[in-house]
Image (spheres, rainbow, N blue to C red):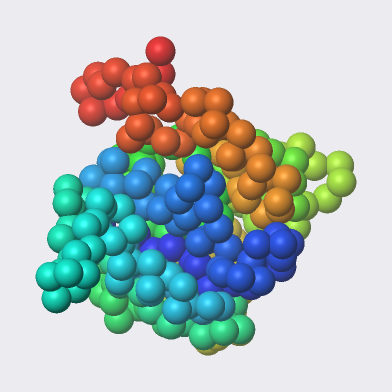
Amino acid sequence: MKVVVLAGGYGTRISEESHLRPKPMIEIGGKPILWHIMKEYSYYGFNDFIICAGYKQHVIKEYFANYYLHNSDITFDFSDNNKMTVHNNVAEPWKVTIVDTGLDTMTGGRIKRVQKYIGDEAFMLTYGDGVCDINLKKLVEFHKTHGKTATITAVELGQRFGILDIEEDKTISSFREKEDSDGARINGGYMVLEPAIFDYLENDTTVFEQTPMKRLASEGQLVAYEFDGFWQCMDTKREMDKLNEMIEAGGAPWMVWDKKQNKHIEEEGAFFYK
């Protein structure tokens, strides 16, 4: 199953960093947050990525073009015809397709633009600025058993995101803007979508979180995977500092691939923290 990552926005709320590079390339723990997101998916066996790029897309392309240089020990021997030797070449089991989805294209438009790379199959979708410790295999299993067009991860956090009104059968009855009185669950990204989703996307001006999601909810085709674990977006410098502090303290729950950060045991394909 392919993984689509929305990575084309301007990142204006964290302009201290994003004026130099796209927000998904801002580093936490010395690595772009995009890398952290991809490592999490890869840990659960999802290694085919489609990156929806836009603002400063060249930074993302150059990073992956030189990925092995960034992550390997290298000897430059200028006395021997400028010979370069790469030691302990680090490679990921990833296939990465980076697509220029436009500078000002909205989220729905970006998804629409990568349709030809996805084909007629279900796919995963997330934003390039949020991490969590969700079990992605369980998320996919949940999506398959509910048979809806779209599954989104619903998290409890009182921030500035679209509110989900969730029924007892986990169907989302409405998708609306947050109000001050709300304490409801919000859209945390980490979605699973059927190819029918492209019928809800019109053009570059389509905002995925508005008309398409509201229509899905009204048609009973939007279901919530309620998640109570760790989730954090990186929308501001304060949130970036928080994530960095967690890594430095050795307690970054989203880094499931790193035993130094999370001591875990494997039991029947699911992971439980000690």
Q: Quadrant of the N terminus?
A: bottom left
**Farthest residue toward the top?**
274
Identify the residue at image location x=38%, y=74%: 61
Q: Nearer the viewer, residue 255 or 205?
A: 255
Q: Nearer the viewer, residue 254 or 29?
A: 29
* 266 up-or-down from 151: above or below: above
Q: Nearer the viewer, residue 5 or 206?
A: 5
* 114 up-or-down from 188: above or below: below
Does the rendering let one see residue 20? yes
Q: Position of residue 95 (x, y in %)?
A: 23, 64
* 156 up-or-down from 114: above or below: above
Does the rendering let one see residue 161? no
Q: Nearer the viewer, residue 35 or 269?
A: 35
**Farthest residue toward the front?**
79
**Farthest residue toward the right?**
180
User: Is 246 on the left or on the right of 261, as rendered?
Assistant: right
User: Is 189 on the left or on the right of 83, as rendered?
Assistant: right
Q: Position of residue 80 (x, y in %)?
A: 12, 70
| Count of residue discs | 0
Q: Position of residue 247 (x, y in %)?
A: 52, 34
User: Is 126 on the left or on the right of 23, as rendered?
Assistant: left
Q: Position of residue 26 (x, y in %)?
A: 55, 58
User: Is 176 on the left or on the right of 119, as rendered?
Assistant: right
